[in-house]
Image (tube, rainbow, N blue to C red):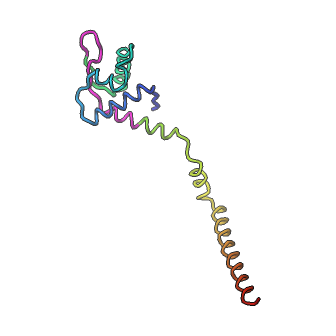
């Protein structure tokens, strides 16, 4: 399941997951709006209601309480908020491009031609070094 959330929605979802992990039974709207940063926004309450409705629709909030003519004066975070956060992190991890070095290593690791090339180059390096040292020794001894 692909899930695309705005920055505010993702921030709120992470807060819901954190509150659930802290075993918070009831979270007040004032506290939630302050944590999200909607307290100073003139349209803050309307935005907050939209956020709560979306999270309730996703299952990240299991109980929403209303008072007067305001929706979501308090609510209860759900365990599903934690699952959604993990799912989104997994989705982001899969979407991130793999490391170029890891790609090259994986491609060449199982290739026998590359393996034999490396072995032959190492052997040639050892032989050239040995020949050079023998030549130096020979030239110093029989100078």
Q: Residue at x 47, y 31 (%)?
A: 2
Q: Is residue 35 left or right of residue 124?
A: left
Q: How many marks?
A: 0
Q: Residue at x 27, y 18 (%)?
A: 73
Residue 5 in the image, given as x and y percentages of width and height: 45, 27
Hey, which quadrant is residue 43 in on the image? Answer: top left
In the image, residue 22 sits, relative to residue 109, either above or below, namely above
Q: Residue at x 43, y 35 (%)?
A: 88
In the image, residue 134 sits, relative to residue 46, either above or below, namely below
Q: Front-most of 20 and 135?
A: 135
In the image, residue 71 sits, relative to residue 60, either above or below, namely above
Residue 17 in the image, given as x and y percentages of width and height: 33, 33
Q: Is residue 61 covered in magenta?
A: no
Q: Is residue 82 covered in magenta?
A: yes
Q: Residue at x 68, y 76 (%)?
A: 129
Residue 81 in the image, given as x and y percentages of width and height: 34, 32
Hey, which quadrant is residue 19 in on the image? Answer: top left
Q: Residue furthest top?
A: 69
Q: Front-most of 112 and 37?
A: 37
The C terminus lies in quadrant? bottom right
Residue stretch rendered in magenta on the structure: 66-86
Hey, which quadrant is residue 139 in on the image? Answer: bottom right
The N terminus lies in quadrant? top left
Residue 32 in the image, given as x and y percentages of width and height: 31, 24
Q: Residue furthest right?
A: 143
């Amino acid at each position: 399941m692909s899930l695309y959330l705005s920055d505010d929605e993702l921030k709120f979802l992470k807060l819901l997951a954190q509150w659930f992990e802290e075993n918070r039974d009831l979270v007040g709207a004032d506290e939630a709006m302050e944590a999200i940063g909607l307290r100073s926004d003139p349209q803050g309450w309307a935005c907050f209601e939209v956020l709560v409705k979306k999270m309730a629709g996703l299952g990240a909030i299991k109980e929403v309480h209303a008072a007067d003519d305001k929706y979501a004066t308090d609510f209860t975070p759900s365990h599903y908020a934690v699952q959604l956060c993990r799912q989104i992190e997994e989705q982001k991890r899969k979407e991130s491009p793999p490391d170029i070095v890891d790609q090259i290593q994986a491609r060449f690791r199982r290739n026998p031609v590359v393996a034999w090339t490396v072995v032959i180059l190492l052997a040639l390096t050892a032989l050239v070094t040995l020949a050079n040292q023998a030549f130096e020794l020979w030239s110093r001894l029989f100078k």
